Amino acid sequence: MALKASTVSNARLMALTRVVDSAEKACEDAERLSGRFWQRYERIRERQWRDSDDEDENDDTISQDSNQYERNEEEEGFDWDERGRQISDIETRLKIEATQAYYAWLSEWDTYFKVHHSQSLMQLHAAMRSKLPIEIRNMVYYHLCKHRSTVYCGSVRHNANFQDFSTQGKIEAEWHYAAEAYSASTLDVHEPGGWLLNSEYVGCDMAREVAAVFYSVNEFWVSNVSSLAKFLNSDRSQTGFKPYEHVRGAFGVNITTTCGNGEQERAWSSTEHELAFLEDLYINLKTLALITCKQQLRVKILLYTGAPLRLTRYNGERRFYNIMETIRSPIYDLIYSDVKVEVEHMRASDHHRRSFTEGEWNHFSMNKSTWEDEKANEGRSLEWLPTGNYISREALDELDKDKLSRLLRERWNHLSPLDTY
């Protein structure tokens, strides 16, 4: 799959490669133009502040760009913001064109590869099966798919819950996504195991055998908890393969509950969105219980939280309480299923880390019998119930603030919520 278009004779593929090269150069030129424009802006602004241009007569930034900018930039009243928007629009248009060029190339390459190479890979696997026992084949697969470091997966192009969900943000994310795929010559670079687990390239039988080795010998980190269920259930071999039956060893999950965008974060913009986000968090985290080899599993969960901007301290405590209530059942069930679990908290304000499963901040210290009693008494064994586990922003206005602090203290041994959140 890493073959480059220059090694093949497909005329259309070669033409598309030239289109990509041209689009990439245009993006680079536009970024360079934008950078120099804003450098000039800063230089001229500094010069105006000093009320002198003697020191800037030989400014390299301006002289190098003498043929690429409008001289009226130095005139009083020049609209820098408008010109900046125009340049940004040009960059955006070029990135859209580059993204389209990447996808066109990838589509053509995908077709070319399947026609000219996938059959030979399937024949190779058939020959391996006829000559080599599974133990030897697994040794081959091990060298093909064993990573020296943690395999990061489950990232998303654009997290609408927390990231800027403007059109510009989506275009930028899609451009990076397509560029990375083009660099690897396959969209499968964004999938666990890459093209080796794609049955359309190597056949169903080989994809399944490689997948069994890939998931059993590597350590994983799922970058976005909303991708966890998909990761553990993804059957790219189209044979009924279940990754959760093979995962073992170190396994990490990142739970992001903010990106510091304040009121722009959709997850916290309304009670409806909050409930949808928390329920999705619960459902995905609960899928960790599917993993079969629990005694060989070491799960690390990184919980990333931040106090809401421009909102009351009680809203910060309310959010933290709701998040902890959501992850309570999945984590306790893992702990008492012979899984070694570590929960680490990262505070968004300064990226300070502390353990939530040991030491003075151990929030999961309940013993097994007490946990089983709680599940039996409160019906928490099967599902997360908003009526019993959730405090809405509307309810907070009517809630005794001391009650919220008491709930945090009683259920989580949480004495200074704002510091932790």
Image: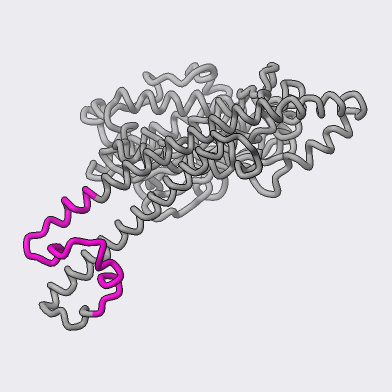
What is the magenta range? 58-86
Residue 293 located within the stretch drawn in magenta: no
Identify which residue is drawn at 22% across, 70% down. Answer: 43
Q: Give the camera-side residue of 191 and 281.
A: 191
Q: Give the camera-side residue of 382 and 64.
A: 64
Above or below — where is 46 with respect to 113? Answer: below
Locate residue 231 relative to residue 145 in the image: left or right.
left
Give the image location of residue 207, x and y in percent: 72, 26
Give the image location of residue 388, x and y in percent: 39, 21
Locate residue 351 relative to residue 267 in the image: left or right.
right
Q: Give the camera-side residue of 105 and 369.
A: 105
Identify which residue is drawn at 91% across, 28% down. Answer: 133
For this orientation, the residue located farthest to the left is 76
Identify which residue is drawn at 7% across, 60% down. Answer: 77
Above or below — where is 59 with respect to 330? Answer: below
Residue 65 located within the stretch drawn in magenta: yes
Give the image location of residue 217, x and y in percent: 74, 38
Q: Give the camera-side residue of 415 and 215.
A: 215
Above or below — where is 292 with respect to 360? Answer: above
